[in-house]
Image (tube, helix red, strand yellow):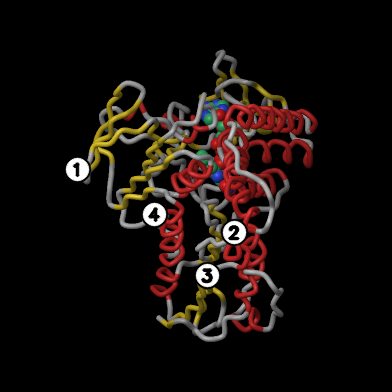
Amino acid sequence: MSFDYDLFVIGGGSGGVRAARVAAGDTGAKVALAEEDRYGGTCVIRGCVPKKLMVFASEYGDMVEDARSYGWDITPGDFDWTAFRGKLEAELDRLEGVYRRLLANSGVETFDQRARLVDAHTVELADGTRKSAKHILIATGGRPVKPDLPGAELGITSNDIFHLDKLPESILIIGGGYIACEFAGILHGLGVKVTQYYRGAQILRGFDDEARGLICEEMCQKGIDVHLGTNILEMTREGDQFRVKATNGTERLFDQVMFATGRAPNADDMGLEGLGIERGRKGQIVVDDYSQTGVPSVYAIGDVTDRVNLTPVAIREGMAFVETVFKGNPTPVDHDLIPTAIFTQPEMGTVGLSEEDAAEQEPIEVYATSFKPMQQSFAGRADRVLMKLVVSQKTRKILGCHIVAPGAGEMIQLAGIAVKMGATKEDFDRTVAVHPTMSEEIVTMKTPTRTA
Ligand SMILES: Cc1cc2nc3c(=O)[nH]c(=O)nc-3n(C[C@H](O)[C@H](O)[C@H](O)COP(=O)(O)OP(=O)(O)OC[C@H]3O[C@@H](n4cnc5c(N)ncnc54)[C@H](O)[C@@H]3O)c2cc1C
């Protein structure tokens, strides 16, 4: 049977673009890709990249203040959102162009349209055109979802934050996940009065308790008004503002309300049900270790499969798919010990198990130190950092490494190599410290803080 393409990819985000261009570029496969919105997907257009640029923008205010403490004769000014947003938009246009060129240069044919599946080998584009392919790869990512409550349609999500005409004077952020906490820090740094409601007992559920406790304390100490155990009941418009009723009995006015209450996989209206492709509890596409669905010609990668929703993971899954299907080298994706960063202020870098999860698994030793870092302390700030290792008593291996500190994302990438290699506490001990740094503490902690 002959097909129009060897591979049809649906979705031009992190995972889809990588799989398409490697399949076409490395193996000479005939590849097409459909993207309904902008090339680069969530990461480039409304996720990691614009967010990190906003993190950078938000940190300059404090830096100017700190510079004064270091003797610089400079005065903090106001942040010009319009000027920044213009530069941000230009940068995202540039990056989208890069993604388009990467595909074109690899010989991938692109369709700027929505696509859905008609059968195991056929894709239908929004204009009704049908294309056949030996393999179909679904890489359609995810989208933010708002809770079902009165007035929720008045609120914004992380998708909208980059396009605001002007920065609000005050914002309520709802949610306690990493996106909620990152934007709380960003907007606070840009001069917005930030309130955060989270229904749970502590922000950043799933991460190490000590680390998330410190982040929450630091966020509060910086002036973010965090309310735990608090959720929104309803919101209504009142003039230019929004009146928000909360579960703690309060009613407050905010200029803007942002929901960061979760994400859903983009797998609806894709023709999956007709094909018998299984969906999970959150609506994600269920795949095996090789990203294959129950229909042998159809694979899915990235956030739409809701495994580990991070850009480098979507990319890895795309590469492993190409290895498996186009290079004759079946490659499962290794989701173990993925280092990751949370760009809160302070930042967190983490790899492996939290103390709580490790302790459930086996007897552990915990090495932890929290201190005021030199640079901020000299500037008169009360900021604290945390360096923490969770160690197996039996194998001596590092089961988890958690860092809360400026630059923790950069640090954990490197510590992650050692942990992935199976480094023991003694390997860390025999590594000479780099002095004076914050991260030297990670190799100088001699006595366990506690055992469990
Ligand atoms: C605010 C925010 C911050 C983030 N920060 C980080 C971070 O710091 N580090 C990190 O690693 N990850 C981060 N992420 C997560 C990261 O962006 C995602 O894990 C990653 O983009 C997933 O890639 P993907 O290829 O699965 O999907 P996506 O990048 O979402 O791409 C999917 C693409 O498919 C398109 N599409 C959907 N349906 C169709 C259809 N039917 N037909 C055609 N096209 C379709 C979409 O328009 C989209 O372009 C962040 C996410 C958000 C929202």
Q: Quadrant of ligand 1?
A: top right
Label drawn at residue 203? 4
Relative vertical location of residue 176 with respect to residue 15 in this rendering, above or below: below
Position of the N terminus, as image quadrant, is: top right
User: Is 322 on the left or on the right of 285, as rendered?
Assistant: right
Q: Quick one: label 4, few (<14), some, or many (20+) residues within 10 Å?
A: many
How far apart are the alpha carbons under marks 3 and 2? 19 Å
Residue at 40 percent across and 70 percent down: it is: 356
Image location of residue 374, percent across then percent down: 61, 68
Which of the marked residues, 2 or 4, is nearer the chain's N terminus? 4
Q: Which residue is mark 3?
A: 400
Which of the marked residues, 3 or 2, is nearer the chain's N terminus? 3
How far apart are the alpha carbons under marks 3 and 1? 40 Å
Closer to the camera, 136 or 107? 107
Which amino acid lies under the numbered mark 3 shown in the image of this protein? Gly
SS class of the residue under badge 1?
loop
Q: Which residue is mark 2?
A: 406
Q: Which residue is mark 1?
A: 249
Q: Mark 3 and 2 residues: CB-CB less than 8 Å, in contact?
A: no
Which amino acid lies under the numbered mark 4 shown in the image of this protein? Ile
